[in-house]
Amino acid sequence: MTKEQPSADAAQAAPAAKPLLTGPKRHHFLPRFYLEGFAKDGMVAVFDREKNEVRVQQTVNTGVIGHFYTMEDAYGRPRFELEQMLSEFEGKASLTVKRLAAREQLTGEERADLAIFVALAGFRTPDIIESLKLFNSGLISDIAKRMFANVDQVKETMRGKPGSPTSEEELEQEAKEMVDFAQGGQYEVTTNHRWAVGMAMKMAFEVAPLLAGRNWLVVHRPNEKKSFVTTDAPVVLSTVTPREPSFYGIGFGNADAMVVFPLTQSCALVMFGEDGALEHRDIASDAIRHMNSAVADRCQRFVIGREEALVRSLADRLGLAEKEWQPKMQRR
């Protein structure tokens, strides 16, 4: 017997949820429980590519930004529903990650919830939020340049519009100024932070079902002397086998897509294919080094692990301090 779904009339008659107007000011874009999985004696080693230094610090002070997920309603009030939602999925994931680290299987519900958590981990970070802002701002700049590329076309668009010059000479001069301004690039287009966060959340929930249907391979370290690292951009999107770069790039929906997500210092999750299987497997030390390099190389600013020597050696080998961060979304 299936549970009866509420009718549309009942849903409309239901009272609206009370707005959540209070909440924490400090928002962890890397959840604390997740960071604790990479800690040693309650501390994590963090390589900072901007300062080219390694710090050993508490998880409570790692991956945190003030009001990063605080939204604003039509009355200008701060709203904390998004931070609350993220916390709820973190609570579910914390138990599921422990089960995978213990080489256990998952229920269908646990798998779906963890897929959402991984998708959110990929899109809730400053890495993606800033990428979206830059992508959108660049797109608007490109549109402006195309709209105001030709003086004659701009004149025809302006002609007869309210507030436009009536004389041909003035119309010509104003159109020329608009074209020069648009083409000169002497302005900055900015994208609203809350819009970018909202767009990132929407993308995450569209990607989550794709991840849930992939094969899941949990790879485990051979011994406690080895460990996985994570970063401030912990979800790595690649392909099962290398391929030539293309105009369209790689998407989560590609048939050959492969997603790597470090779960704890002892294991990592690899998602690929489309059979929905779950397997646990030990991997060799060189495979862990390769995976750590792939994860660290895609960081925005921070590489995080249990030991200073580990994150420093990765940063030095990859030359992270000499590389500038590149947005994950770029216009071709």
Image (cartoon, rainbow, N blue to C red):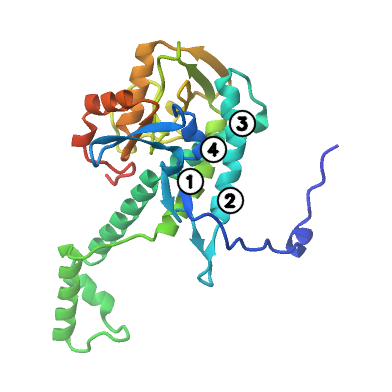
The N terminus sits in image quarter: top right
Disc nearest the viewer among 2 and 1: 2
Please say if the residues under marks 2 and 1 sit with CB atoms less than 8 Å apart: no
Q: Position of residue 122 (x, y in %)?
A: 44, 39
Please say if the residues under marks 4 and 1 sit with CB atoms less than 8 Å apart: no
What residue is rendered at 51% in x and 13% in y? 281
Tell which of 119 and 143 is nearer to you.
119
- Residue to which mark 1 is pinned: 203
Please say if the residues under marks 1 and 3 sit with CB atoms less than 8 Å apart: no
What's the residue type where badge 1 is placed? Answer: Met
Ranked by sequence position, the earlier of labels 4 and 3 is 3
What's the residue type where badge 4 is placed? Answer: Phe
Q: Where is residue 314 in the image (x, y as percent from the top left)?
A: 28, 25
SS at mark 1 in the image: helix
Mark linked to residue 117: 4
Res. 141 visible in picture: yes
Ranked by sequence position, the earlier of labels 2 and 4 is 2
- Residue to which mark 2 is pinned: 84
Mark linked to residue 87: none
Ranked by sequence position, the earlier of labels 1 and 3 is 3
Ranked by sequence position, the earlier of labels 2 and 1 is 2
Query: Most extreme residue toward the bottom, as rendered?
Result: 166
Tell which of 66 and 209 is nearer to you.
66
- Residue to which mark 3 is pinned: 95
Residue 179 drawn above or below residue 163 = above
